Amino acid sequence: MNFKEAKAHKKDAVKNADESVSNLFHIIITPSNTDESAKFITDFLRSPETFNDESCKDYCSDDDYEVVSFKKEPTDVD
């Protein structure tokens, strides 16, 4: 999906997630390309607070995105 579609999908996912999911999981937009996604997630995990939805564009070469969720590490939990 393109970035605009991914942003809408993330918005729905966050809206439909209950509070425990929001507290325990990151829900982010990432490039669909596996290598680009891995690089983005690695950098994201170093400093999640410095990233926003637009940050993934710097890692994406083909305007193809997906929305993913993964468990926050204990040090990431608010």
Image: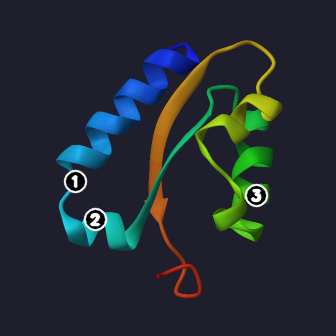
Tell me the CA gap for discs 3 and 2. 21 Å
Q: Which residue is at a point 70% across and 26% down the rendered structure image?
A: 33
- SS label for mark 3: helix
Query: On screen, 55 above or below 31?
Result: below
Residue labelled with disc 1: 17
Residue 48 at x, y percent in the picture = 65, 64
Residue 59 lies in what quarter of the image?
top right
**In the picture provided, is 12 more to the left or to the right than 25?**
left
- Sequence order check: which comes first, mark 3 or mark 2? 2
Query: What amino acid is labelled 3 in the image?
Result: Thr
Q: Outermost residue, bottom direction?
A: 75
Task: Identify which residue, 26 or 49, lies in the foreground.
Answer: 49
Residue 32 at x, y percent in the picture = 62, 26
Circle number at residue 34: none
**In the picture provided, is 65 more to the left or to the right than 67?**
right
Residue labelled with disc 3: 42
- SS label for mark 2: helix
- SS label for mark 1: loop
Q: Which residue is at a point 74% across and 12% down the rendered structure image?
A: 62
Q: Are marks 2 and 1 in contact (CB under 8 Å)?
A: yes
Q: Which residue is at a point 22% across and 53% down the rendered structure image?
A: 17
Query: What amino acid is labelled 1 in the image?
Result: Ala
Residue labelled with disc 2: 21
Query: What amino acid is labelled 2 in the image?
Result: Val
Residue 67 at x, y percent in the picture = 47, 36
* Closer mark to the observer between disc 3 and disc 1: 1
Is the residue marked by circle 1 packed among few (<14), some (14-19), or many (20+) residues within 10 Å?
few
**In the picture provided, is 47 more to the left or to the right than 71?**
right
Residue 18 at x, y percent in the picture = 18, 61
**In the picture provided, is 15 more to the left or to the right than 31?**
left
- Sequence order check: which comes first, mark 3 or mark 1? 1
Q: Do the residues labelled 3 and 1 touch (CB within 8 Å)?
A: no
